[in-house]
Amino acid sequence: MDDDLFGDEVLPIPPRPPSKQLQQRLDEMRSRGCCRTIAYSKHGIIASISPDGTHVNLQCPHARPDDGQWELNEPIQCSILPAPLPGGPIVHLAWAPTMAPELAVIDAFGRICLLGFPVHLNKAAFSRKWDADAQDDLHSVVGCYWLPLHLPRGVNIICGPVVKDDANAKYQFNNTYNQTIGPWHPNPQKSALVCVTASGLLKLFFSQNNNQLQEIHLEMESVASSDDLITHASICSERGKLLIVLATAAKQLKVILAEISWGMPQPQQDKQIPPGSLPLRPSLKIEHVHTTSWLQQGSADSHLDTSMDQISHLEVLPPVLDIRTKVMTPAMILAVRLHLPTARSHYNLEHQSIIDRWTVALDQPQQLHPAFEQRGSRAGASSSPGTIAMLNKGESIVINKIIVSIETSLYGRVICIGFSDGTVQYRDRITMAEIYQEENDRQITIMQQAGLHFTDEKPSLHTSFSSNNCSYAQICENGKVRWSSLQYPAAEISATKADPQHDAVFASFVMAFANSVHQNSNCDDILAIARPFAEKQPRFIIGLLKAVVNTLGVNIDYSEGNPQDQLPRNGYLHFIMSVLNHFGFQGDFRPRSFSGRFIGLGLSLRNIIILITMATNAPNERMREKINPLDDPEVVVVLSSNMKWVIDLMSWITDGLLSLRDDPKFMELLDNPQRFSEMTEYLKAKNNVSLHLLLCSSTRWLLATVVRRFPYLQSISQKAMQVLDPRQPAGSTESPGTGVQSLYQAYARLQHSISTDLIKIEEFEKLLASVSADVRQMYQGTLAHLQQKQQQQQGQQKPGQPNPAEHALKKAQAQCELPILLADQPPASFQGLVKKLFETDLKTIMGSTNRSELFFTDFPLLDVEDNVHRLARRKTDGRYVDIFRRIEQKAPQLVNDAAAANNGGSPAVSKLLQQPGQEVQQNGETSRADQPGFRRCTRCCSVMEELHATRPGFNFVVSLQRKCVCGGSWAALS
């Protein structure tokens, strides 16, 4: 203990007095249960309420177009209703767990507006308006809950915690499984909103099978006086029912079970009723199970307990599986009480929060007194008493800080707590023990235990965490939103693996990416954390993605070349390609890295295959009668430009291969097996990815698939031109410029696009087939020992059992494919087939290729330019490649917006958001939302023109572009 000069104990420095904004925030939390002013969705959208409560601001983290670094964009005002609002101020925001973002906006009178985000992260559309809702204080919402989604597998997969093995000092990535708990919406793609009002009404907002939103309600409590009013409510799922916890003004804590019956008819064996064809007729049913008081004097180890007679948070957490005991833990109720000293409190300046907790024990057997057992029971009466529900009070937790938010992550396993000083804390859901954020290389549950931390904490009024626990958004005392992501000390990031924390950091990234995939959540905040490592350690991302592929079990081997393989539906592979593509992006009008160029071309091929498939095949028979995309000239024009892009790619690949064949240094590397390992580094120096596009089975499969579509498209274009021939016989009323004429011209353009003199498509297809055959033959030769093992075990294997040798064979092939997919060095066994490719296979395609014309041809649509002067010229002209239409768009305003953002100005993405047909004012100018604009990917910064389709065929094709080619989300640019 330190002493001063007089021997007295040194007094601690008292905390600074609470600000007026914090006091106002605490009053809001104590007065109503629904007062979330900022919400971070799993899709990466940050919605916040303006300080005056008149509108909602939308923001999202995005990569800067100039250098790819991550930042939070400027807030975009979402005008729900023209100001002033007819009701009260907006007080609460809640995101749905659906795959398409959906936001519930609630005002002080309990009016509810639902917003959907079908395409853009920062552009909303109404799902439900609140015009018809009553303006009554008794209808104010004190608790709300979105129903979870029904998963086909029935469990939620969680990667972690990651444990270090003492035997080999390597980290083990083990999955844990948390059983999903209903109730669910009958449509597995939809959710439903459950609300509790201050007057005790239970409301259910649900979507009918015809997508019409409807509402039902049920009275849970009768309010006779102000003491009966409900101040806070919380809801969770429990055994297929809803567990509802209410806190009243009279300090009562009530537990209610609610059941939702959707009114679905029972299926009959003699009638086949298609799902979703009958309307839903839901009903609600409740059961009061327990009542107690949430204020129990002396329940906490705090001398301030008696003065904290108001709760600020009420949360009920659903049951989770204890991985240690393999037993489901019961639901838990958390109630937070706060003490914030005022300026007049001279005797005590402590900030303090008390978390009271109860476990909800349902179906507990009743214990009868022995005296009752001595008395006989009546005839026909049951001798055993029924079960009851009990609340078991746990030890309260005292924290000398002010809690401003409580959320859960990893499907409720981790409790995230935000404090008013800007710091955060994590606790284990089962034990409520704090998960310390100090470095711990033995077991990693959160990334902070690997040495990553949030820095530069600032006072906060409300904090919302991302679903990955890698970033959070907070409302500061000045009313502005601040985004903070985990950071690793830049000076400690080594260019090699010399950092002692390297393995722990590496394992934490693998765990974060794996959980992001399992949760179907946006991983942009993880990319933001990993980008400094990728810049300092070029091989960090390659090693990281290898570990992620092995952890998730991603199928990356398409060497068999089976046309029935559905590579475009491989979501895990698309995720891996998307991550690699982001780190290859160095900024607009800058040469892409070797891996970024390679994987970007592969992603474009994947999107073109999806486009061709959807344009030539309606989704079902019923829609095929009404919608045929190939009858729309706009669809045919988009197809023609995309096929022109494919021909450019094949020509560029051919030119790149022939250039390597003429390179004596490259051929010297091929001739010497000992120097074959230097090949990829040489290719990276030349930034030539042509060879990797052929060697990688995934990109080779994509190339072969799209090449096979050429004869089909050529056939239908010829037939269409014959049917739509404008040379009509005499007396025909058909005139030029009509829809038929436009469709004929579109097919003529398609016919011209798929015809080329640079290369022969048939010869390129033969080249792909030859490489595929050589790869399969190489695998059969180098993996012959596994084949022999397979034959030996076939005699011992019982019918119906999986063959472990066959699994080992596929695993070995995947390990050979993995480095090529990540744009790394192919295995040494590939040396022979690569040499054959350049010495034998290319001779055939050389004879049918116009080398001189190919050499002098530019391919601006491929975005593979390396010449700095040409890139600068394109930047000056503001020329972008439309990622969907595959044409050059001249949009100099995007370049100007990026320059303005770098100079501290407001970029175009920060312009006011408007609903269709509404007008807004900014800087004295009036603009309309329906004017054509652009959208930009938040991850790879690709650009696409906004297309306002009016015809059903073109609208169907455009609607498929809800995500960027790379899998990132779109942000609207006005």
Image (tube, grey):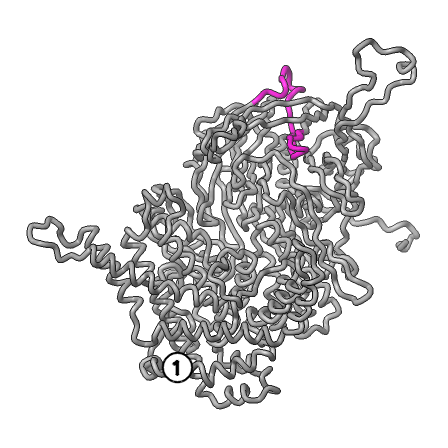
Residue 247, compared with residue 525, is above or below; it is above
Asked which secondary structure carries label 1, the reply is helix
Judging depth in this view, the residue of 24 and 948 nearest the camera is 948
Identified by mark 1, the residue type is Thr
* Quadrant assignment, res 633: bottom left
Left or right: 568 as drawn, with respect to 459: left
Residue 380, compared with residue 140, is above or below; it is above
**Whole-percent x, y for residue 499 in the image:** 72, 71
Left or right: 580 as drawn, with respect to 647: right
Left or right: 507 as drawn, with respect to 269: right
**Whole-percent x, y for residue 449 in the image:** 74, 58
Judging depth in this view, the residue of 704 and 96 nearest the camera is 704
The answer to if 934 sits in the magenta stretch is no
| Residue in view at x 33 percent, y 59 percent | 639
Left or right: 495 as drawn, with respect to 863: right
The answer to if 228 sits in the magenta stretch is yes
**Whole-percent x, y for residue 303 in the image:** 83, 35
Task: Please tell me how crowded label 1 is: few (under 14), some (14-19), or many (20+) other residues with Cα within 10 Å.
Answer: few
Judging depth in this view, the residue of 693 and 80 nearest the camera is 693
Residue corresponding to mark 1: 844
* Quadrant assignment, res 882: bottom left
State whether residue 129 appears in this view: no
Count up the numbered dots.
1
Judging depth in this view, the residue of 791 and 419 nearest the camera is 791
Q: Residue furthest left?
A: 730
| Residue in view at x 42 percent, y 57 percent | 610
The boundaries of the magenta stretch are 218-244
**Whole-percent x, y for residue 799 in the image:** 66, 55
